[in-house]
Amino acid sequence: MKLVGLTLLVVIGILISGCGPSSPGMSPWAKEQKVYGFSFIEGNVVEVFANKVIVQLDDKDVVQGDAYEDKLTNKIIKQSMFISGMKTSLGKENAIVEDVRGNQITFNLKSSKLNSGDSVKIYIPKKTIAIMDFSLIGMENSGINKFAMEDMTTRMVQSGQYVVVEREKLNAILKEQQLADSGLLNESSSSKIGKLLSADIILTGSFAKQGNRWNVNLRLVDVTTGVILSAINEKISGDEFRVKQSKDSSNITEDFEDSQLSIGWIKNVLNKSGSKSKGTIDNTTGANGTKGSYKIEYKLKKQKSAVVFVNRRLRDISKYTGIKFYAKASKDTTLAVNIHDLNYDDAYLNRWKSVVSVGSQWKEFKLPFNNMSLGKNHAQNNPGGDGTFDRDNIHNIAFGIGGKANPMDEKINFWIDEISFY
């Protein structure tokens, strides 16, 4: 599946709505965050000499909120508000940005009637920004760095400060230049890509996992000069990052027709306790006359053996009532569908389970969430979990074939297609 939208201005931003204090067990983003776009900012003239005017800008937030992503968004916007060489105006006078040092900006004017101590209104030019995929360091599931694209981009667009480069255009340039969209490009490469995209700024960076904390490193690169406009470093808790930033409330709609797995799916089937399997996209068969499906070729060695096709994208599925899919197998197969959730007040995962029998012909299965039962040994490293199905905090969706309910030492093919919520 193609990436939807643009990634991450990253963790910046974005994704939170609602209002009022949160009650126990509620999503932590129940407090509303607001974005206020503005075209002018006020400041005070610090000094005037020759044709130069130095202005101290007001410290004005664009995103109103005290969550870490709001603070990061504000830092990015503030530290890229003016770029050296950019044309603007001080009051009614045209000016060029000559130097930027934090909130203190030096403007070049042909002539000026401004004096030290004067208040002045400064026009903020809209800038074009290209946002690289951020690298996630220290986490097995590297695909998680694609999360929350639409919501994160929305906050930047709402601010009115940027024109965001389309994702397709960015990908085309990266492919043409044979550069990986990793978020770790150096300033020279960032500047080159930015110029090809007609962008003013490149946002790049990484998230490094350190224990239960994340070290966030962001860089804003001036495309014209290749100079780093700003380097931002923040430390956030792992719980905040996982809960707030990696939620996806969109539908899965995985049909395997474009020969790619959508974000979150683990490409290779997981093998447990001696099972042998291979998972691939099969372009020769699909449900409802289509030509794409996911095929698992497997052999189970013992009762504890299992093969698992899993999606590890963190999700909010609270607006859906169930999961549906089509499946078939070369021999009658018992399939376990597992959904793992994590309650905000409990440290362990719950495993919610439905079991279906799959035959040799394509069949649609619709599994209501309310009919799922709490599986045994459902919590990782703990027999507990709170036993409440928190659909707004889903960590894994897994399709598993285990040795207890299926033949062993036989080569069997299994296909699944058109996975979605309803």
Image (cartoon, rainbow, N blue to C red):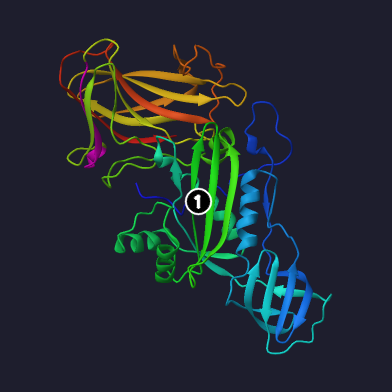
- Residue 114 position in % (x across, y down): 79, 83
Q: Residue at x 71, y 74 (%)?
A: 122
Which is nearer the eye, 159 or 198?
A: 198
Q: Residue at x 39, y 50 (%)?
A: 3
Residue 392 location, quadrant: top right
In the rendered image of this protein, does residue 12 appear above or below residue 51?
Answer: above
Residue type beneath disc 1: Leu
112 left or right of 300?
Answer: right
Q: Quadrant of the C terminus?
A: top left
Density class for disc 1 (Cα within 10 Å; few <14, some 14-19, many ≥20) is: many
- Residue 175 position in % (x across, y down): 31, 60
Q: Residue at x 54, y 39 (%)?
A: 214
In the rendered image of this protein, does residue 337 appear above or below residue 249?
Answer: above
The answer, for residue 348, to whether it is visible in the render is: yes
Farthest residue toward the front?
Answer: 49
The magenta segment is 288-300
- Residue 209 position in % (x across, y down): 50, 37
Farthest residue toward the bottom?
Answer: 111
- The residue that disc 1 covers is 8
Q: Any magenta on residue 280?
A: no
- Residue 405 position in % (x across, y down): 28, 11
